[in-house]
Image: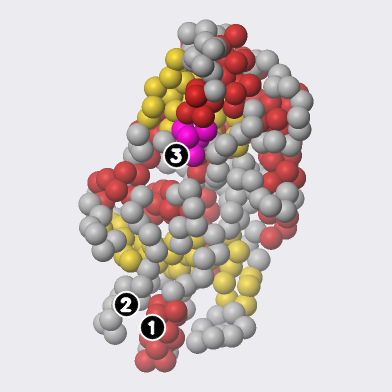
Amino acid sequence: MLWDIFCRVIDNHGDLGVCWRLSANLASRGHQIRLWVDDASALTWMAPEVNLNAEGWGQLAFATGQIEVRPWSAPLSDTGLASQIWIEGFGCELPDHFVQWAAEQSEDKPEAQVPVWLNLEYLSAESYVERSHKLPSPVMSGPLKGRTKWFFYPGFTDKTGGLLRDAHVANRLPSIAAASPSVPQSTFLFCYEPDALSEAVDQLLAQSPTNVWHVAHGRGALAFEKVLAQRTHHKRPLFQSCPPMPQAKFDAQLKQSDLNFVRGEDSLVRAIWAGKAFVWHIYPQDDGAHGPKLQAFLDWLGAPESLRSFHMRWNGLTEDPLPPIDLALWQDCVTSARKRLMAQMDLVSQILQFVAEKR
């Protein structure tokens, strides 16, 4: 089938990261994707194989499917192919010109089948996700008045849309229980600006003096540099700076590290699939909504007290000292959560099932 997937980049590249993974997963299953993006520049390092040009156009062929990256404002001609599915990434809404084009196509070809229109929402473990998943949202105004969107919520339970999962994830987890060290020897850092970062550096130096920090580019790297600058009379940690990485290399880095600090939605899911102990830096919101969201995730995860306390301090929700890192206990927790998720249907399979029902 032909899909139109829409993505507006707000910040931190997470929206584009998720939409690209979704597109690639569908294309690997033989579908044709038009990915509309208002700023696709991050694909030059996130997915360099797409060969993005200066205008924001790109293309990537799979064995049986394909992704065409299109600038947000690029018009479709009257002879443009009509797709069977529309997906608004994170409720971004459709470009005005696309809405007008779609309305004109409906007028000219009333026999044409109405596309299935999904609003792919943000990931959360909160209880409203199960209640809201697959609910209809009638369009009440505009050229497409009378159509219906459907809310589609990713999630962590079998009453939600599940998680994005590559077909090969099931074969990626080695016998890490026997291979994992008692304390981290390799730590990956991808975060915002946690107040507890300096404290975490001190703790790991004390627990594991030979631990090496692999520091991802961006806001977390700037925060790490600030911590180093303040340690003029203290022992400095071993570290390695990581440039912007393609998604496959990012995923590989998570698998290679003993402890992963990750942020946002996309890297949280990848940390779970990597099967290594992790700490999540949730995106902070001015209204404090991130607090209950983090608590709900930790409840679902079955986080032991030390991991829960670490998360709360790392996310600035308490001022308690960081608890010691219990790598074996945290590892067991993640392994158990990953096993539960592997027993559930993945997000793309559920979307395909839902589309088949609605068509």
Q: Secondary structure at mark 2?
A: loop
Quarter of the figure with the N terminus: bottom left
Q: Is residue 89 left or right of residue 325?
A: left
> Along the horizontal axis of the image, is 71 left or right of 198?
left
- Viewer-side residue, 256 vs 166: 256
Among the two numbered marks 1 and 3 on one chain, the one whose residue lies closer to the N terminus: 1
* Residue at 65% across, 59% down: 133
Farthest residue toward the front? 232
Indicate which disc residue 218 carries. 3
Residue 31 location, quadrant: bottom left
The answer to whether residue 262 is seen in the rendering is: yes
Q: Earlier in the sequence, mark 1 or mark 2?
A: 2
**Which residue bears the numbered disc 2?**
75
| Category of crowding for the residue at label 2, using alpha-carbon neighbours closer than 10 angstroms: few (below 14), some (14–19), many (at least 20) | some
Q: Is residue 205 above or below residue 127?
A: above
Residue 222 sits inside the magenta stretch: yes
Up the image or down, 338 lies above or below 177; here it is below
Residue 108: give x, y in percent of width and height. 37, 92
Is the Cβ of the residue at disc 1 closer than 8 Å to that at disc 3? no
Closest to the camera, between mark 1 and mark 2, is 2
> Which of the two marks, 1 or 3, is nearer to us in this view?
3
Q: Nearer the viewer, residue 357 or 336?
A: 336
Residue 132 rendering spot, x and y as whole percentages: 69, 60
- The residue lying at 55 percent from left, 12 percent from top is 234
Residue 3 seen in render: no
Q: Is residue 220 magenta?
A: yes
Which portion, as a residue range, is magenta?
218-224
Q: Could you tell me the amino acid type at mark 1? A: Trp
Disc 3 residue type (three-letter):
Gly
Q: How far separated are the C-alphas under marks 1 and 3?
A: 38 Å
Q: In percent of the image, x 67 and y 36: which residue is there?
A: 315
Q: What amino acid type should be assigned to the residue bearing mark 2? A: Pro
